[in-house]
Image: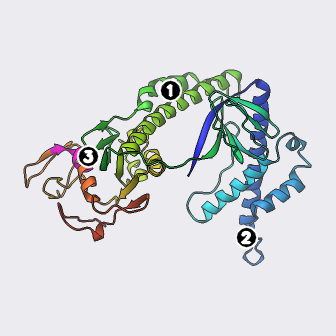
């Protein structure tokens, strides 16, 4: 299977300038192509009888070479791959928009999400050096895998540059401590396992929120575009990167532990966007990183020979008693201890939900790497399943 490898580059000032030029050309090509494609869409809406074919990535690149490059000679100072891949990504973004997977592509701004892609003669010779077309040999801070990637992506976060590419990794079947484990997400704690173990969230944003607010407050009167303003923007970007890195580190450690030690991992299909609508819990939910948690589990279970089962979001895991199967009609968020009125069973709310998730799919695990539990075909063994519509 393919996995992404990303590491920081060790650059000098000349190399940083070259990378900035490549980002600028890629951004200019994207904005030019976006403006052109929007004109085509507006023309087709205004003239239904004289529709123009929506250009492909190849058409956009041909027009770019014929119309844009002669008027902008600085295009020839960078690799031809930078604008070519930018137009290809633009066409992919439009395809996602037409399929209603994502919104309309937006124009890019300088300093926001700077990145570009390269292909061609890419060679990794030493452990910490990689040779790229038009850029020469670049150094890294850590050892590189001894592979020959076909393409690489170079991006910038704050004032640091990173290179990423894909590598082929063979899946391994590691010995598992248990077969099935239920994982219940929470706001107070990141995850509660059916084994009783609790994993606390990083809460990196909450811990560094005061420092971030202070830096932003000191930047309020600086003139936009000045040297002091740029220095403050770098400080803010560095702190945002630190917050994200702490969160990712916590999630990677937890997901790796689950994938290595459990054969089947059962989680709930949470409606994260709907949960974010709650203004009282939105900040805490965003600080946990539920979507990233699920994304990492999806590929790590395949990597370590496990399975990921996603339970339907309408399954009442918190309202159902894990002891007798009786379901409560209502359960407020303030009730952190589940108390069953039928069998007098008491248990932590999150632990009760994780046990229900484990019991729900203990006999309905799919044979593939990941799947979804279908509750319409389940046998009622320990509890009755009632699905809300």
Q: What secondary structure is the stretch in magenta mostly built from?
A: helix
Specify the quadrant that holds the C terminus. bottom left
Residue indicated by mark 2: 44
Residue 267 in the image: state x and y as whole percent: 35, 52
Cα distance in 3D space between marks 3 and 2: 56 Å
Cα distance in 3D space between marks 1 and 2: 47 Å
Q: Is residue 196 left or right of 313 when viewed as pictured?
A: left
| Residue displayed at 61% across by 38% down | 6
**Span colored in magenta:** 347-354
| Residue displayed at 58% across by 57% down | 103
Q: Earlier in the sequence, mark 3 or mark 2?
A: 2
- Crowd rating for badge 3 (residues with CA inside 10 Å; few <14, some 14–19, many 20+): many
- Crowd rating for badge 2 (residues with CA inside 10 Å; few <14, some 14–19, many 20+): some
Residue indicated by mark 3: 194
**Closer to the camera in the image, 156 or 183:** 183
Vertically, is 132 above or below 308? Answer: above
Cα distance in 3D space between marks 3 and 1: 36 Å
Q: Are marks 1 and 2 in contact (CB under 8 Å)?
A: no
Q: Is residue 343 left or right of 300 when viewed as pictured?
A: left
Residue 113 in the image: state x and y as whole percent: 65, 40
Residue indicated by mark 1: 212
Q: Earlier in the sequence, mark 3 or mark 1?
A: 3
Vertically, is 288 above or below 107? Answer: above
| Residue displayed at 37% across by 57% down | 310
Q: Is residue 60 left or right of 188 when viewed as pictured?
A: right
Q: Splitting the image into 4 quarters, where does residue 257 fall?
A: top left
Please identify, in this view, whether the residue under mark 1 or under mark 2 is nearer the observer.
Answer: 1
């Amino acid at each position: 299977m393919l996995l992404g490898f990303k590491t920081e580059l060790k650059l000098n000032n000349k190399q940083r300038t070259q990378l900035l030029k490549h980002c600028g050309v890629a951004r200019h090509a994207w904005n030019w192509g976006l403006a052109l494609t929007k004109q085509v869409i507006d023309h087709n809406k205004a003239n239904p009888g004289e529709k123009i074919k929506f250009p492909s990535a190849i058409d956009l690149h041909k027009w770019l070479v014929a119309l844009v490059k002669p008027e902008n000679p600085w295009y020839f100072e960078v690799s031809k791959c930078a604008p070519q891949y930018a137009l290809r990504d633009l066409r992919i973004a439009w395809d996602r928009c037409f399929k209603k997977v994502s919104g309309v592509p937006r124009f890019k701004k300088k300093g926001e999400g700077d990145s570009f892609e390269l292909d061609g003669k890419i060679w990794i010779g030493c452990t910490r050096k990689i040779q790229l077309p038009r850029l020469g040999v670049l150094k890294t801070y850590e050892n590189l895998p001894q592979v020959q990637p076909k393409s690489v992506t170079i991006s910038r976060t704050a004032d640091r540059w990173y290179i990423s590419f894909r590598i082929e990794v063979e899946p391994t079947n590691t010995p598992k401590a248990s077969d099935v484990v239920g994982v219940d997400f929470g706001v107070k704690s990141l995850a509660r396992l059916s084994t009783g173990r609790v994993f606390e969230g990083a809460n990196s944003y909450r811990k560094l929120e005061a420092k971030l607010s202070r830096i932003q407050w000191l930047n309020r009167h600086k003139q936009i575009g000045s040297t002091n303003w740029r220095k403050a923007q770098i400080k803010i970007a560095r702190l945002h990167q630190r917050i994200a890195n702490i969160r990712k580190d916590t999630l990677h450690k937890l997901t790796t532990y689950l994938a290595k030690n459990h054969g089947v991992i059962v989680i709930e299909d949470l409606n994260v966007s709907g949960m974010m609508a709650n203004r009282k819990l939105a900040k805490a939910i965003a600080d946990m990183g539920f979507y990233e948690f699920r994304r990492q589990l999806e590929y790590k279970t395949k990597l370590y020979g496990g399975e990921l089962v996603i339970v339907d979001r309408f399954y009442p895991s918190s309202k159902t008693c894990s002891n007798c199967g009786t379901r409560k009609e209502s359960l407020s968020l303030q009730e952190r201890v589940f108390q069953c009125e039928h069998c007098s069973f008491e248990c932590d709310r999150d632990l009760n939900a994780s046990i229900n998730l484990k019991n729900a799919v203990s006999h309905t695990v799919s044979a593939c790497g990941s799947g979804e539990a279908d509750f319409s075909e389940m046998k009622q063994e320990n509890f009755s399943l009632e699905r809300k519509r």
